[in-house]
Amino acid sequence: MKRILITGAAGFLGSHLCDRFVSEEFTVIGMDNLITGNIKNIEHLFPLKNFEYYHHDVSKFVHVPGQLDYILHFASPASPIDYLKMPIQTLKVGSLGTHNLLGLAKSKNARILIASTSEVYGDPLVHPQREDYWGNVNPIGPRGVYDEAKRFQEAITMAYHTYHGLETRIIRIFNTYGPRMRVEDGRVLPAFFCQAIRGEGLTVFGEGNQTRSFCYVDDLVEGIYRLLFSNYHLPVNIGNPSEITILQFAKEIMALVQNPKAHIIYDPLPVDDPKQRQPDITLAKDILGWEPKVSREEGLIKTYKYFKDLLKGMD
Ligand code: UDP
């Protein structure tokens, strides 16, 4: 049996990855320090023989006994609200944490895939974003702690690839959504769903004409899986190119939830909020034969059910 280490295992993406690899008969070692992850996301895996959980902060030296074939590095605060609250941890997990995991991969002769982000493109001046665009990032702005950590992460990963010949993979993840996002996550989709279900104001930042492109989590997991087993070591965008303004997105969620008390309110636009974001996925199509299968309509219905049940349990 192949053994895979997944960092950020109790998080939104990490936990879905644990599910996928456990079901593919890998032995999965899930690691998390639970600063943003939730152990409930992986509790159902605890009885399985091919799942182990380590409570650990990967910014400190990482020790995993025995053979290791693959590493997926998904530990990091990932919502702007979280990385504003935890700027140092965000910088450390992207830099020191990545260094530790690259060292572990080298010592075990394992292949490592690191989770990078569309944030490496910053507030992009090229649209849609292709992998060869270098980005427009403010290093000292509030988002800099995440963006620069992820840029450093890509740089050190490439250095381990070229200098040590390590097998590395880099995925640039665009906005992703689905079950297991947290109510208090702060990102736009959980915020809008919870506000709509509770009959509150949906907090549109600015005038809501900034755009994002939302990918359903199952599509993302499939893209990660294919990239890990590909032989391509340069960064690959994975995301859904279907682009929408944030105001339109608020309206779609209100139309789905149908709570007559829900309404739109306008709050100030956060500093350095990217004005537009859409992945160019030509590369993923060419080298992975991957493209998203779940439409926003379908993905939002599944996610609505998740948030409705979650909030019912909390009230
Ligand atoms: N946003 C919003 N209301 C909210 C939360 C976010 O209008 O309650 C906007 C935010 O300003 C950004 C977009 O939605 O333009 C996506 O924000 P998110 O925090 O989900 O992630 P980002 O794509 O900015 O990393």
Image: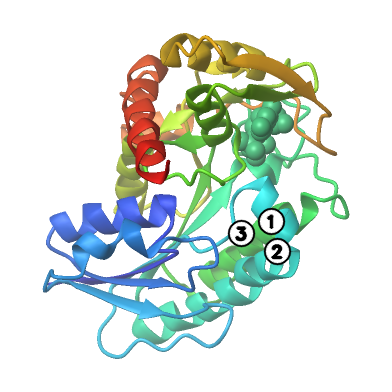
Query: Is 162 displayed left or right of 125 in the figure?
Result: left
| Tag 1 secondary structure | helix
Q: CA distance from mark 2 to mark 3?
A: 21 Å
Give the number of the mark in front: 3 or 1.
1
Residue assigned mark 3: 154
Residue drawn at (51%, 13%) of the image: 254
Residue assigned mark 2: 86
> Is residue 232 visible to us here?
no
Residue drawn at (12%, 62%) of the image: 25
Estimate how packed mark 2 is, as few (under 14), some (14 to 19) or many (20 or more) residues with alpha carbons within 10 Å: some
Q: CA distance from mark 3 to mark 1?
A: 18 Å
Q: Relative to 279, is 27 above or below?
A: below
Residue drawn at (41%, 87%) of the image: 107
Residue assigned mark 1: 83
Q: Relative to 271, is 295 above or below?
A: above
Residue 296 % position (x, y):
41, 19
User: Toward the viewer: 135 or 50?
Assistant: 50
Residue 157 % position (x, y):
56, 66
Q: Is mark 3 within 8 Å of ligand 1?
A: no
N-term mark: 2 or 3: 2
Query: Is 266 displayed left or right of 315 in the figure?
Result: right
Query: Is 23 displayed left or right of 247 in the figure?
Result: left
